[in-house]
Amino acid sequence: MFDTEIEEDDSTASLQVEREGEVTSFANEDEKASKTEKFFRQRAESIYQEYTTRYQRRFKWLRSTLFDIKKLKRDLLEDAKALINVLQQCGEWNPQKDEKLAALIKLLTETHPKDKVLIFTQFADTVRYLADNLQSSLITNVAGVTGQSKDPTIMTGRFSPVSNGKREKISSSDELRILIATDVLSEGHNLQDCAIIVNWDLPWAIIRLIQRAGRVDRIGQNADKILCYSFLPAEGVERIINLRGRLRKRLQENAEVVGTDEAFFEDDDARVILDLYNEKSGVLDGEEDTEVDLTSEAFQIWKKATDGNPGLKKTIEEMENVVYSTRAYTPQPVQPEGVLLYMKTTEGNDSLIYVDRDGNSVTQSQLAVLRVAACEESTPAIPRDKQHHELVQKGAELIAEEEKNAGGQLGRPSGARFRTYERLKSYVKEMNGTLFVSEELLKAIDEIYRYPLRQSAIDTLNRQLRSGINNQQLAELVVALRMDDRLCIVTEELEKREPQIICSLGLFSNS
């Protein structure tokens, strides 16, 4: 971190010091060659001296008493010595002996010698390493993008000129065939001129895989298949850390909770994660900026409940509706006694609510409700409070009222049906009187309002809404889905559903 020329672009941890446009380096070439404990101690002391004097005002300083812990010092020293030992054992890195790099070069020169390839990695220095070594291997039209790239859109335009409307501006000599990027490009960019993705490293956060694939799996993609290559650890390392097995298990367990569609390993038998935010599991709906955390929370609750007890999963799934229980609970100022209710509404939407003893909704956050509901399998039940069923009724009434106010049959504001309808209604108003407002579009909007979406349409719309689809593209997608009879379940005989209370949990003090 002290080497100013080796910055981690996509991190806030850079220790490079600048003053009046000048970069101060604290190391020379001889020092870099001697990676010893003494060397690093001297370097740290030198830089710390600079920071406490010359650059003191640039930092917010923590009290020294926070670090007056012998164990912390001992652990830090042990970690530092272990890292230094690794550096000394490995010596200088030789790209010529990098089997993983050789496999990538073979993929780019033999398997896909002319195709566009998008390569993702977590680290900015890996982007530079790959770009430099691919170019030195005489592979042309290669570029890298990191968090500190001045304008990533320039590179995306050169890599995917058609989808970015720059075909006429990008010459064949300027067009990129291979783009290497950190996850700075995993959201908000059109890269669908390409249909091949390489995961140089596998992110533990499953959402990253979906976001990466979403850069090319979007409207305007002409390929029949999207190929996704992922590098796995060497066999010996894989035996130790079991990365593939752990990721496969997590993908499968995630799939059991939220549904699946895309295979990330070629032998997975369609074990996939389609859309972590689809309305099929409406309890996972939430505001845009919290849905990933909500999904993760729901997954962890389910996993914790069923791990080590496979029979519990079957028991839970076979429970009848309206099942209820009560557990001992110590009320908090913002989390009072009350009842948690999970129900399906008359429009088939899933809803969670937390009501207090007065029948008032405690929070609008589905994530907060899930967290309050979590408990150990061994937690004993206590007798039902006399207000329990009364509060369940009140919660059901509040959910019905909320659905009515939020758009009735359109469902939750965060759902695909509600968001698609609202965006298209706004689009029609904006483009009124133009050729963009076709009769087919108006019919599609009317059907979205009157009839429920097909599950496949929900999945498709959720994915595209997350990918940043614009209103015109959304309108074209909806019309295409309707023309293929893949948009709504259209029937004049569609009956109004009865609301269904699935389960409820009382939270009351055991006194």
Image: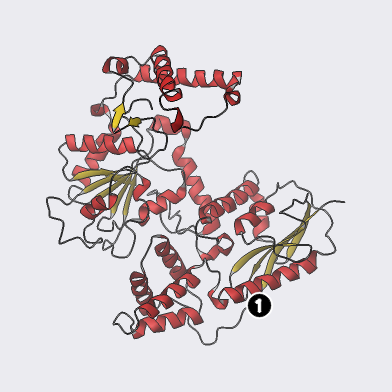
Q: Is residue 143 above or below residue 75?
A: below
Mark 1 sits on what residue? 498
Q: Is residue 183 left or right of residue 358?
A: left
Viewer-closest of 185 and 360: 360
- Please, what is the three-letter code of the amino acid marked with disc 1? Glu
Count of marks placed on residues? 1
Q: Quadrant of the N terminus?
A: top left
Q: Position of residue 40 (x, y in %)?
A: 40, 17
Quarter residue 361 falls in: bottom right
Instruction: Characterize the local packing of mark 1: few (<14), some (14-19) or many (20 or more) Cα atoms within 10 angstroms.
Output: few
Q: Residue furthest top?
A: 38
Q: Residue furthest bottom?
A: 492
Quarter residue 437 falls in: bottom left
Residue found 32% across the figure and 30% down from its top: 6
The reply to whether residue 346 is in sight is yes
Q: Is residue 447 left or right of residue 118?
A: right
Q: Is residue 328 above or below residue 426?
A: above
Viewer-closest of 388 and 368: 368
Colour scheme in use: secondary structure
Q: Position of residue 492 (x, y in %)?
A: 52, 87
Viewer-closest of 497 and 289: 289
Quarter residue 347 falls in: bottom right
Q: Is residue 426 left or right of residue 494?
A: left
Q: Position of residue 360 (x, y in %)?
A: 73, 65
Residue found 17% across the figure and 61% down from its top: 167
Q: Position of residue 507 (x, y in %)?
A: 76, 55
Residue found 60% across the figure and 55% down from its top: 367
